[in-house]
């Protein structure tokens, strides 16, 4: 079933999932054209067939499925741009590259997103906090001061 669903639409299912993730932030973040293309390629991988088939029959993803979906997020979306409104900042190119690299390299952000997807956000809160602290290391002194002042 997953292979049949996967072959339809040229990967649009991946783009729809990624767009849904982007909109879920509720802060105006939009999926870029590059992110959309990445999501299409991601979903077309033969490794995703079981995930697609399972998603068609199960409303609540397992922990492993949620982790795969979190991988889509960190692989194809600009994590830094999705988070920027939460920090009330416009990240520099260097800050964005650092944050995106952290999200892709470290498991904290991925674990936090996977817990949210699987319906157990409390399970990812520690990981989410650790990622937030790591993000601070990516910020310039000026932006750190702005974040500190905003959080009083």
Image: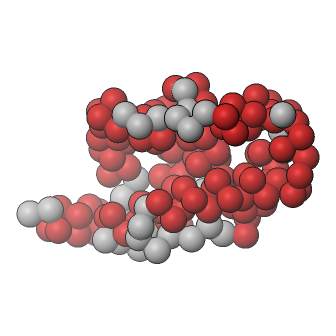
Give left or right: position of 4 versus 87: right
Residue at 70 percent across and 39 percent down: it is 56
Q: For residue 61, what is the image quadrant?
A: top right
Q: Residue furthest front?
A: 57
Asked whether 114 or 62 is in front, the reply is 62
Residue 108 position, x and y percent, is 43, 34
Q: Is residue 74 above or below residue 25?
A: above
Residue at 64 percent across and 53 percent down: it is 17
> Quadrant location of the N terminus?
top right
Residue at 35 percent across and 38 percent down: it is 121
> Could you tell me if residue 51 is visible in this image?
no
Residue at 88 percent across and 36 percent down: it is 3
Asked whether 42 or 13 is in front, the reply is 13
Give left or right: position of 72 versus 99: right
Q: For residue 25, what is the image quadrant?
A: bottom left
Residue 122 position, x and y percent, is 29, 34
Give left or right: position of 39 versus 68: right
Residue 109 position, x and y percent, is 45, 40
């Amino acid at each position: 079933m997953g292979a049949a669903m996967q072959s339809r639409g040229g990967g649009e299912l991946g783009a729809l999932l990624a767009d849904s993730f982007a909109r879920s932030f509720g802060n105006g973040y939009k999926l870029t054209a590059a992110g959309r293309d990445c999501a299409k390629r991601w979903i077309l991988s033969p490794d995703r067939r079981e995930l697609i088939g399972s998603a068609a029959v199960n409303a609540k993803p397992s922990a492993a499925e949620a982790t795969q979906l979190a991988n889509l997020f960190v692989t194809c979306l600009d994590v830094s741009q999705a988070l920027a409104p939460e920090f009330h900042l416009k990240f520099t190119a260097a800050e964005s590259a650092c944050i995106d690299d952290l999200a892709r390299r470290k498991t904290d952000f991925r674990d936090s997103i996977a817990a949210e997807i699987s319906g157990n956000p409390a399970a990812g809160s520690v990981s989410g906090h650790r990622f937030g602290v790591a993000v601070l290391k990516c910020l310039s002194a000026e932006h750190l001061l702005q974040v500190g002042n905003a959080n009083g």
